[in-house]
Image: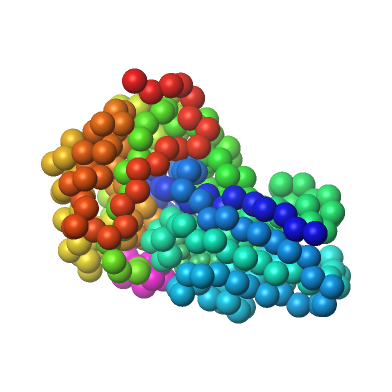
Amino acid sequence: MYVLEKAPAKINLTLDVLYKRPDDYHEIEMVMTTIDLADRIELVSLNEDCIKIESENRFVPNDERNLAYRAAKLLKETYQITKGVKIYIEKHIPVAAGLAGGSSDAAATLRGLNRLWSLGLSIERLASLGAKIGSDVSFCVYNTTALAQGRGEIITELPAPPACWVVLAKPTLGVSTQSIYQKLNLSEVNHPNTTAMIDALKNGDYLSMCRELGNVLEPTTVSLYQEVYQIKRQMEQSGADAVLMSGSGPTVFAFVRQESRAHRIYNSLRGFCDEVYVVRMLGYQEPLD
Ligand code: ATP
C-alpha cells in the first residue's frame, strides 16, 4: 500500500519579527502563500517497525535530521503505530532556500500518513502536531494563504493573492535561518505593515500587495550575501512589479502580471544564477492577461 502527496513551497509576502520571547523564540507575524513548485512525497507501508528515507538529492538527510522522518516518528509515537514506512522524497524545491521545503515535506508526510494509516485526524490536529516539528510545518499542513503568528504555529487563513506570475531565483548558497535570526538587530528593523497586506489580499488589490511586500530579515541576509542584492536589482531592472527575499533567504522572488515579462526576467537571470523558476501561486482568483 502506498500514498502520494504534493509538498508545495511557500513564499513570504510579509515577515515581521515583533520581539524576542522569554522562551528564546521570536514572536513573529508573517503573511505566507503557497506556490506551484512542489516536492513529491511517496509513502510506502512497511511490515517492519521502522522509518526509511530515500531521496536522490544529496542535500536531503536520510535520518532523524529530516523533518519528514520526524513527522513519521511523531505520529508513530503519539498513536502507537507499529507499522513502518518508507518515505521517498522527490526533491524539486531548492534546499535551505527560505521556501520551507523541509517543513512542507514534513506536512505532506503528516497528511499522507493520516491516510495511509487511516488515523482520521483533522487538518487542525495535524497542524498542531506539525508545530512540534518546526515553526513553518503548521502553515504547510494547510497549503493555503494565511497569517502565521506566535512562533509561526497560529494560523489564520486569508484569501488567495490576486493572480500573477512568480519568478524565483536562488543563488548557489544555503542560508541558516538560525544564524540570520542571531544577527538580527531588532532596534533597527523596518517593520512591514501586516494589516495593509491583509487588506490588499481581502480587496484582491495587486498593486497594494506589491507595495506592501516586506521582510525584516532581508537587510541582514543582504549584508552577508551580496548575490541577494544583485539578483534583486537584476529583477527590478528587468521589469518586475515587486521583488522580495523569502524567509531568511537566499531565494528572491519577483511578481509580474504578464507571462512574457516573467520570461524576460527568467532569461535575464540565466548564467547569473543557477536555480531560476517561473511559477504561479496556488488558488489564484482570476485569469491573467
Ligand atoms: P528554514 O527556513 O526552516 O530553515 P528552508 O526552507 O530555508 O527552511 P529547507 O529546505 O527546509 O530550508 O532546509 C533547511 C535544512 O533542513 C537543510 O539544510 C537540510 O539539512 C534540513 N532538512 C531536513 N529535512 C529536509 C527535507 N525534507 N528536505 C530538505 N532539507 C531538509
User: Is residue 153 toward the left or the right of residue 165 in the image?
Assistant: right
Q: In the figure, 168 relative to 64: above or below?
A: above
Q: Residue at x 22, y 66 (%)?
A: 225
- In the depicted structure, whether residue 266 falls above or below residue 201: below
Of 208 and 40, which appears nearest the observer? 40
Quadrant of the image containing the N terminus: bottom right
Q: Position of residue 10 (x, y in %)?
A: 47, 49
Asked if residue 243 is among those painted magenta in the image, a careful observer would answer no
User: Residue 213's x, y, as percent?
Assistant: 33, 41
Residue, x 62% and y 65% (percent of image)?
88
Q: Name the residue at 82% across, 77% down.
A: 48
Quarter of the image holding residue 192? top left
Question: Where is residue 259 shown, x and y percent of the image?
Answer: 31, 31
Q: Image check: 146 left or right of 190?
A: right
Q: Residue at x 32, y 57 (%)?
A: 275
Above or below: residue 50 compared with residue 205: below
**Region in magenta:** 176-186
> Which residue is nearer to you in this view: 249 or 217?
249
Residue 91 visible within the image: yes
Q: Looking at the picture, how far across and down is residue 37, in whole percent? A: 46, 48
For this view, does 256 lie left or right of residue 31? left
